Amino acid sequence: MSSNVERVKEEIEALEAIFMEDISISYNGQDLPETVKMTIFPSTANDIDKQYVCVTFEAMLPEMYPDIPPIVKLKNPRGLDDSILNSLYDAIKDKCFEFSSQPVIYELIELIRENLTECNLPTCQCAVCLYGFCDGDVFTKTQCFHYFHSFCLAKHLLTTEKHYSEEQDKLPAWQKSTKAFQAACPVCREAINCDVDDLKSAPPPKDLESAQNFSVTSELKMLQCKMQELFSYQKSRGGIIDIEEEENKLLLITNSSDDSSPDVDPGPSLEQVDENNPKSSIDRKFKSDFRKTSR
Amino acid sequence: MAALPRRIIKETQRLMQEPVPGISAIPDESNARYFHVIVTGPEDSPFEGGLFKLELFLPEDYPMSAPKVRFITKIYHPNIDRLGRICLDILKDKWSPALQIRTVLLSIQALLSAPNPDDPLANDVAELWKVNESEAIRNAKEWTRRYAMDT
């Protein structure tokens, strides 16, 4: 047992010496290391602008570690899709097996880093156009590690800024915001700062051009028929909103005070109370429609 | 008419191939930006068992602007008015192009599970929902049974 404790201590000391402040270790009540956590980036000679993917590695060390392998979790993956994550988990499992009963954390971190370096191109989709990133596409990584074709992000930024200033123009002077427009990431709404002029000169994404066209299939036609049937059925039961009728009702609220005529719908009002039904008159109107149609 | 943006085609295909449980959205025959939608009332809500028809329209600059969505089937809900208009932030100032037809419809379905009478669109419904919740829920159930069934 004590030899295990010694070995783990040595390993942790070595990890801290190598990764310094990049790695964080948490300890349990007995002052023994419990979890090792580190956000791993691809090796790009520390050029942060060229790091397009990252993942947070978390290893829980069981009491019997290293006789028993650590429990590894990969959290907050950025720019990595599920298939890459799954293959990373498989590689981690193989590495743990290869290093059974030996300290393995350093090996795992390097394994993940190698994999990230190999696939240092976002494999996710652009959340704006829903297409992937091809070789040659110009794309942008936000500070929050979300990816967009520069072309798509520019469109988003220009539109939200336009909407913002339109809304501001509508407000009276005293309600106008004193803050300038702040762009937000479409995915996580974190504030982002980008050079729109630079982005908008980017070409549209390549995948868009090769996408196939839309056609109405027989399956779609069948679904359209089903929807139509439901619509007709609900209409026959008075369940469909008649916009014109509803708008007229709203007009009548202010014009009519006559509640006695059965032909005129007096519109909704909170004060009106029926003896049998202490609800607003609009409910009575629906009830009479219902009686008519169910006859 | 201008060509349909690829994103709309992609969303339409995915809606057909991997439909969201309890939600169907199909494009109109003559206008691929207009969708016929059915949202089923969520379990354990007063709308359970109901099939609610909605219409959804993708404006010219979608996905930069939010889709326009409206209930067609009558519904008794504090955040949905008589005309079927819906009070939901992601359809207004909280719209983001990362949202899609499916996520919008899921949010609307979630709104059915969690009515918010403090941010009302239908004032009389919201008022009753606040002063007498059990009666409001009875009304919502009654409207669902009466207007939103299929057979």
Image: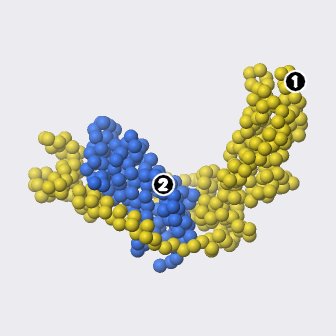
Q: Secondary structure at mark 2?
A: loop
Tell me the tag on residue B20: 2
- Distance of mark 1 from mark 2, alpha carbons? 54 Å
Q: Residues within 10 Å of mark 1 (few under 14, many from 20)?
A: few
For the point 23% across and 57% down, the residue is: A238
Position of B1 with respect to A281 (left or right) is right
Residue type indicated by callout 1? Ser
Quadrant of residue A34 within the rendered picture: top right
Looking at the picture, the colour scheme in use is by chain
Q: Measured from the top left, where is residue B62 in percent x and y?
A: 51, 66
Q: Residues within 10 Å of mark 2 (few under 14, many from 20)?
A: some
For the point 83% across and 46% down, the residue is: A110
Name the residue that disc number 1 marks.
Answer: A3
Quadrant of residue B115 within the rendered picture: top left
Q: Residue furthest bottom?
A: B1
Chain yellow in the figure, letter: A
For the point 80% across and 40% down, the residue is: A97
Q: Chain of mark 2?
A: B
Chain blue in the figure, letter: B
Identify whether B50 is placed above or below B58. Answer: above
For the point 43% across and 70% down, the residue is: A218
